[in-house]
Image (cartoon, helix red, strand yellow):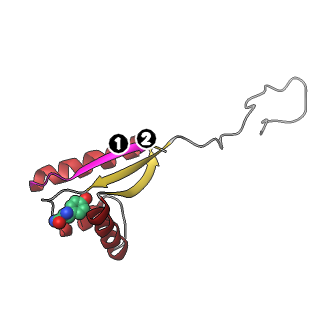
Amino acid sequence: MTNIGTDSKSDVLERTKNKTTKPPMFKVYLLNDDYTTMDFVVEILEVVFRHSPITATSIMLSIHKSGKGLAGVYTKEIAETKVAQVHSAAARSGFPLKSIMEKE
Ligand code: TYC
């Protein structure tokens, strides 16, 4: 909404609309499996998704029981990076842990 400058007719219209429109957001999920340890999933939720130990444990247990759980919601590029970080940490540790993203 902000038009830079004053009310002079000769002023250049530098901006016709503000920059408050929201970017598309993506949900990042972790999926359950039978081989990844609970401790590893909690560590991923703490380190990659910045959850507290208590929240990370609660999310992990909900994934274990239901099959899938929300780890976080991010813009596209950040969501893609989180998914890649999960897969590379899991591969490095020999776990099949999977992460997926979905547009909100
Ligand atoms: N089901 C795993 C086990 O019993 C634990 C687990 C939880 C694995 C969440 C993946 O996203 C996951 N060791």
Which residue of the protein is positioned furthest toward the right in this rendering?
8
In the rendered image, which quarter is residue 30 located in? bottom left
Quick check: 104 left or right of 63?
Answer: right
Residue for point 41% across, 43% down: 102
Amino acid type at mark 1: Glu
Image location of residue 81, percent across then percent down: 32, 45
Residue for point 90% across, 25% down: 9
In the rendered image, which quarter is residue 58 located in? bottom left
Image location of residue 51, percent across then percent down: 37, 67
Residue on which disc 1 sits: 80
Image location of residue 43, percent across then percent down: 24, 66
- Do the residues under discs 2 and 1 have CB atoms within 8 angstroms? yes
The answer for how far apart the CA atoms under marks 2 and 1 are is: 6 Å
Q: Which residues are magenta?
A: 94-102
- Please, what secondary structure does the residue beneath circle 1 have? helix
**Is the residue 83 above or below the residue 71 in the image?**
above
How many neighbours does mark 2 have within 10 angstroms: few (below 14), some (14-19), or many (20 or more)?
some
Which residue of the protein is positioned furthest toward the front in this rendering?
66
In the rendered image, which quarter is residue 10 located in? top right
Residue 100 lies in magenta, yes or no?
Answer: yes
Residue for point 35% across, 76% down: 54
Amino acid type at mark 2: Lys
- Please, what secondary structure does the residue beneath circle 2 have? helix
Could you tell me if residue 33 is visible in this image? yes
**Is the residue 76 above or below the residue 62 in the image?**
above
Residue on which disc 2 sits: 76
Ligand 1 rendered quadrant: bottom left
Quick check: 102 left or right of 86?
Answer: right
Which residue of the protein is positioned furthest toward the top in this rendering?
10
Q: Nearer the viewer, residue 4 or 66?
A: 66
